Image (tube, rainbow, N blue to C red):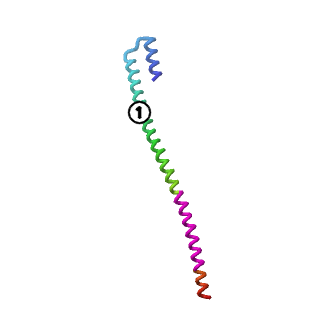
């Protein structure tokens, strides 16, 4: 934009504009403004997507923590069950010994 405005200013100061030169520059400015507006819209859209991704990352982090807690509880339950099974086998052995005795 700055370059186009400088060119326009220089052309006005140095000589009389040629026919259609100013309109060409104006059309170019309008075209560049349209491109700029599209880029701004894209930036806003990307900002929204980035914000959504951050929210989703927080949800994923919470779910990961939940999964880790469940894994810890499952390991504790597994340990309790293994202990219970061992104790049950020991009782069965002592019952069998008592019957034989």
Question: Furthest-bottom residue in view?
Answer: 101
| Neighbours of disc 1 within 10 Å: few (<14), some (14-19), many (20+) | few
Numbered circles on residues, count = 1
Quadrant of the drawing holding the N terminus: top left
Magenta highlight on residue 89: yes
Secondary structure of the residue carrying numbered label 1: helix
Q: Which residue is mark 1?
A: 38
Q: Residue 94 in the image: x percent, y percent?
A: 60, 81
- Front-most of 55 and 92? 92
Please say if 87 is above or below 78: below
Please say if 31 is above or below 15: below
Magenta highlight on residue 21: no
Could you tell me which residue is drawn at 37 percent across and 18 percent down? 20
Q: Is residue 98 left or right of residue 24?
A: right
Could you tell me which residue is drawn at 45 percent across and 12 percent down? 13
Q: Residue 97 in the image: x percent, y percent?
A: 61, 84
Q: Is residue 73 left or right of residue 18?
A: right
Residue stretch rendered in magenta on the structure: 68-91
Could you tell me which residue is drawn at 47 percent across and 47 percent down? 56
Magenta stretch mostly in which secondary structure?
helix
Could you tell me which residue is drawn at 58 percent across and 77 percent down? 89
Q: Residue 27 in the image: x percent, y percent?
A: 38, 23
Please say if 16 is above or below 46: above
Quadrant of the drawing holding the C terminus: bottom right
- Front-most of 36 and 77? 77
The quarter holding residue 49 reads top left
Q: Residue 5 in the image: x percent, y percent?
A: 44, 19
The quarter holding residue 44 reads top left
């Amino acid at each position: 934009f700055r370059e186009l405005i400088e060119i326009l200013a220089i052309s006005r100061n140095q000589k009389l504009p040629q026919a259609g030169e100013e309109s060409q520059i104006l059309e170019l400015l309008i075209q560049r403004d349209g491109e700029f507006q599209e880029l701004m819209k894209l930036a806003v859209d990307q900002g929204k997507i980035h914000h959504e991704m951050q929210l989703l990352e927080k949800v994923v982090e919470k779910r990961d923590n939940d999964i880790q807690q469940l894994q810890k509880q499952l390991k504790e339950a597994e340990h309790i069950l293994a202990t219970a099974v061992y104790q049950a086998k020991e009782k069965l052995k002592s019952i069998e010994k008592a019957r034989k005795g």
